[in-house]
């Protein structure tokens, strides 16, 4: 008798619609889209609405589930500006379509090499990091290059600097 009742309940559950047609799953739209251009357009719209800009042409993020203390801290989830990291059934989940590979999660993680990011810049350079120290070194080198470029814009040669400022010191 109980077996017949359970069977009828299972059949009724299987016949129920899975999703309401009025509910739109934005993560599903990004992940299931077949065309790359359409996927990129949707990603751009989502990031624009969140006030973010896509700085890297390609990237990859991974979390080592063995070393992650996500159950205790969830710092990476709080640090993520695009909500690409989320809590799911005892572990940190990743929505790669929303990740901008900024490194905020790596900077906030208390375990080295728990979160690893690989990203490709527009100029083709690939960057890898998994420790806060690596992120800071990378950002420092990028900022140093930008500073040198700005100085070269103002003074392309040492002679120009000398002609402009040397006579004032005498």
Image (cartoon, helix red, strand yellow):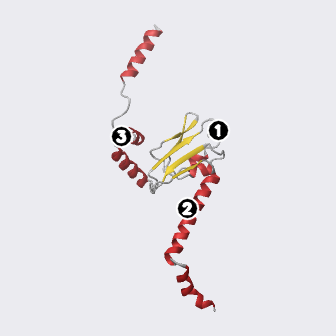
Which badge, 2 or 1, comes first in the chain's sequence? Answer: 1
* Residue 166 place in picture, x, y as percent: 59, 87
**Residue depicted at 62% across the width and 57% down the height:** 137
- Mark 1 Cα within 10 Å, few/some/many (few <14, many 20+)? few
Instruction: Please determine whether, in this image, residue 55 is positioned above or below residue 22.
Output: below
Point out the frontmost of discs 3 and 2.
2
Disc 3 from disc 1: Cα separation: 32 Å
Residue 162's x, y, as percent? 57, 85
Mark 3 crowdedness (10 Å alpha carbons): few <14, some 14-19, many ≥20: few
Indicate the position of residue 21 as horizontal and vertical percent values.
33, 36
Between disc 3 and disc 1, whose residue precedes? 3
Residue in the foreground of this view, choosing between 119 and 114? 119
Q: Secondary structure at mark 3?
A: loop
Residue underneath mark 3: 33
Residue topped by disc 2? 142
Which quadrant of the rendered structure holds the N terminus? top left
Mark 2 Cα-neighbour bin, 10 Å: few <14, some 14–19, many ≥20 = few
- In screen coordinates, is 39 left or right of 58? left
Mark pair 2, 1: CA separation = 30 Å
Horizontal relation, residue 38 to residue 74: left or right: left
Q: Point out the image quarter for the C terminus.
A: bottom right
- The residue carrying mark 1 is 67
Vertical position of residue 74 compared to residue 140: above or below: above
């Amino acid at each position: 008798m109980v077996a017949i009742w359970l069977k009828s309940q299972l059949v009724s559950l299987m016949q129920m619609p899975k999703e309401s047609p009025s509910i739109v799953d934005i993560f599903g739209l990004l992940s299931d889209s077949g065309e790359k251009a359409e996927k990129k357009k949707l990603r751009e719209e989502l990031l624009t609405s969140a006030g973010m800009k896509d700085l890297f042409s390609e990237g990859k993020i991974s979390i080592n589930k063995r070393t992650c203390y996500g159950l205790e801290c969830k710092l990476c989830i709080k640090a993520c500006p695009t909500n690409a990291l989320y809590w799911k059934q005892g572990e940190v989940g990743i929505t790669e379509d929303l990740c901008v590979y900024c490194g905020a999660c790596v900077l906030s993680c208390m375990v080295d090499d728990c979160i690893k990011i690989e990203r490709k810049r527009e100029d083709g350079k690939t960057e890898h990091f998994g420790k806060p120290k690596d992120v800071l070194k990378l950002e420092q080198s990028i900022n140093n290059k930008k500073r040198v470029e700005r100085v070269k814009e103002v003074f392309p040669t040492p002679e120009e600097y000398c002609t402009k400022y040397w006579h004032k010191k005498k």
